[in-house]
Amino acid sequence: MPLDQTPYYDYDDEETSGEKEMTFIEHLEELRWHIIRSVAAILIFMIGAWFSMSWIFKNIILGPSRPDFWTYRKLCELGKMVGIESLCVSELNFTLMSREVSGQFMMALTASAIIGLLFAFPYVFWEIWRFIKPGLKITEKKAATGSVFFVTALFFLGVMFGYFIVAPFAINFLVNFQIDESIKNQFDIQSYISILATLTLACGVTFQLPMAIFVLTRIGVVTPAFLKEYRKHSIVIILIVAAVITPSPDMISQVVVAIPLFFLYEVSILVSQRVYNRKLKEEKE
């Protein structure tokens, strides 16, 4: 084999694994087209978001800034049900301002880019998977079956959790926190967008924990026994996070946030156990 060529394996056929050789330049060329298609998908969704920006800002981006937001209404209903009126959000003590000449234009552009990336995520991840898949062994492909679906589902589940739970609670806590009544809260729109986007996308990434545990268990870094041993530590961390982002110090609102995080950790343990058992079976065979 020539020195400037590296082996490239194609295991699409499980019974007859073909092998073709690709040069380093050919690898780069293939990667380039994956990147081009991914960027094109992001741009398409970005352009669509740009032309719908007025509706998106009013109904989605600025939603958590109003007391009639879905989360606040449901939280108030829960508070009335359990007799804790403090859960109701009657007002959000702040006003949004644009302090720069190009402020609103840049915010529309930034929001379009974020939305484009958000909706193009499944396709972008699929392109990444198509690039790395030919280099995997047959057993590795079998183990990763459905990874695109699960990664996408967990990502959007995390985004929804961040948008409807974490972001509203955090925004409500921050804007209603006052050192003195004489200090008025007037926030720049860029600051609001930054917090909303950061919390929402961060939750989308955080919900990839089961998939991360899947990979770490597969390569032998993590075991189900390790996760079970540190379950108590994870509970403490989750409760601390829930206490920080909830709008009031009562236990009800903290539990509302903490339960999905507990569930996510328990799912990760089950995933790790399944992968670990499969590894033991393969080693015996």
Image (cartoon, rainbow, N blue to C red):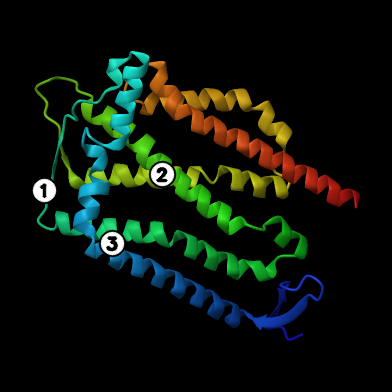
Check disc 3 and report the residue beneath it: 49
Q: Nearer the viewer, residue 253 or 101?
A: 253
Q: Amino acid at mark 3?
A: Ala
Check disc 2 and report the residue beneath it: 160
Residue at horizontal 70%, vertical 32%? Answer: 226
| Number of residues whose C-alpha sits closer than 10 Å to that of mark 3, classed few (under 14), some (14–19) or many (20 or more) | many
Q: CA distance from mark 1 to mark 3?
A: 24 Å
Q: CA distance from mark 1 to mark 2?
A: 30 Å
Q: Nearer the viewer, residue 177 or 93?
A: 93
Give coordinates of residue 6: x percent, y percent: 70, 78
| Number of residues whose C-alpha sits closer than 10 Å to that of mark 1, classed few (under 14), some (14–19) or many (20 or more) | few
| Number of residues whose C-alpha sits closer than 10 Å to that of mark 2, classed few (under 14), some (14–19) or many (20 or more) | some
Give coordinates of residue 240: x percent, y percent: 45, 24
Contact flag, marks 1 and 3 (Cβ < 8 Å)? no
If you read the primary sequence from the N terminus, does the residue marked by circle 3 or circle 2 appear first? 3
The image shows residue 148, relative to residue 89, as above or below, that is: below
Give coordinates of residue 139: x percent, y percent: 77, 60
Q: CA distance from mark 3 to mark 2?
A: 18 Å
278 to the left or right of 32: right
Residue at horizontal 57%, vertical 28%? Answer: 234
Give coordinates of residue 127: x percent, y percent: 53, 68
Q: Amino acid at mark 1?
A: Arg
Check disc 1 and report the residue beneath it: 99
Q: Secondary structure at mark 1?
A: loop
